[in-house]
Amino acid sequence: MSLPWAYVPLDVEPSHLPNVIGTIRSENVRGANVTVPLKTLILRHLDKVDPSAQRLNSVNTIYKKGGH
């Protein structure tokens, strides 16, 4: 299966998270998977959080609504 996107793993230090979120917002990035220790730290950088993620204080996946 040939898909028109790439999955690129990034090793993000917690102190760089705001910059990475800014890049995701401004570039042609549709979303990202989030791993420990960023699952909790990323919450404050998101526009909207699913109620179950809020209850668990943990996010696994983020995406841009509309993909843009």
Image (cartoon, rainbow, N blue to C red):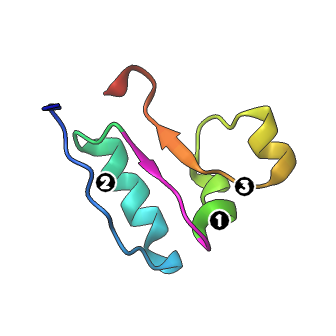
- What is the C-alpha distance between the residues marked 2 and 1? 17 Å
Say what amino acid the circle numbered 1 marks: Leu
Whether tag 3 and tag 2 are in contact, CB under 8 A, the answer is: no
Residue 41 badge:
1
Q: Looking at the rendering, which quadrant does residue 49 occupy? A: top right
Q: Nearer the viewer, residue 26 or 31?
A: 31
CB atoms at circles 2 and 1 under 8 Å apart? no
Disc 3 secondary structure class: loop
Residue found at x 80% / y 34%: 51
Q: Is residue 50 found left or right of 65 in the rendered image? A: right
Magenta-colored span: 31-37
Q: From this viewpoint, which residue is outermost toward the right?
A: 55
Q: Quadrant of the C terminus?
A: top left
Residue named by callout 3: 58
Q: Decide: marks 3, 1 in contact (CB < 8 A)?
A: no
Where is 46 relative to 64, above or below? below
Q: Amino acid at mark 3?
A: Ser
- 29 in relation to 3, above or below: below
